[in-house]
Image: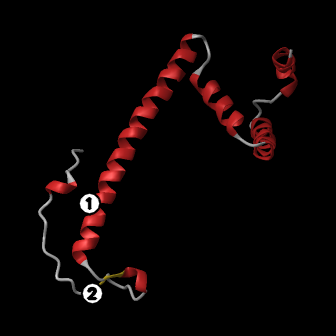
Amino acid sequence: MARRNPDEQGEQEGSGDVVDFPGGEQPEQRVQDTDKIRREIRKAFKEMDTLSGQRDELNAKANEIRARMKNKGIPTKAFNAAYSRYSQDEEKREAFDFAFALCCNSVGVGYQPELFDAVEAEAAE
């Protein structure tokens, strides 16, 4: 979807009148100066476009990291799950571990944390 440049949109003259949005009786929904709010809207759209572009660039870099790990034999889903767990604080990590084990055991795929003891011991050395 092609984006329009907010600056290229036709500048329509505002009346300067107070404008109420439909169903709005709260003061924050009243617009006193339509010219000013239009400028603010165009500025906000530009900022959102900039952030969207930055997000696309960051996502591409993150995907490069995932691809590099996949080429080393680490499945992407395993990498993502481990990174998600790594990013959590201890309390959330404990809740995640409990819920993960409960889900696995509930559907019969089993969860045996002792399988990871050797990996954790090696990492601690």
Local SS, label 1:
helix
Q: Position of residue 108 (x, y in %)?
A: 77, 33
Q: Residue 87 sits in which quadrant? A: top right
Mark 2 is surrounded, within 10 Å at the Cα level, by few (under 14), some (14 to 19) or many (20 or more) other residues, namely few
Q: Position of residue 51 (x, y in %)?
A: 39, 46
Of the residues under marks 1 and 2, which one precedes in the sequence? 2
* Relative height, residue 22 to residue 105 (above, below): below
Left or right position of 23 against 75: left
Identify the residue at horizontal 25%, vertical 65% (top origin).
39
Amino acid beneath label 2: Val
The label number, if any, that marks residue 42 in the structure image: 1
Left or right position of 12 against 85: left
Identify the residue at horizontal 32%, vertical 48% (top origin).
49
What is the CA distance from the residue labelled 1 to the residue labelled 2? 20 Å
Q: Residue 18 sits in which quadrant? A: bottom left
Q: Residue 6 sits in which quadrant? A: bottom left
Give the residue pinned by disc 2: 18
- Disc tally is 2
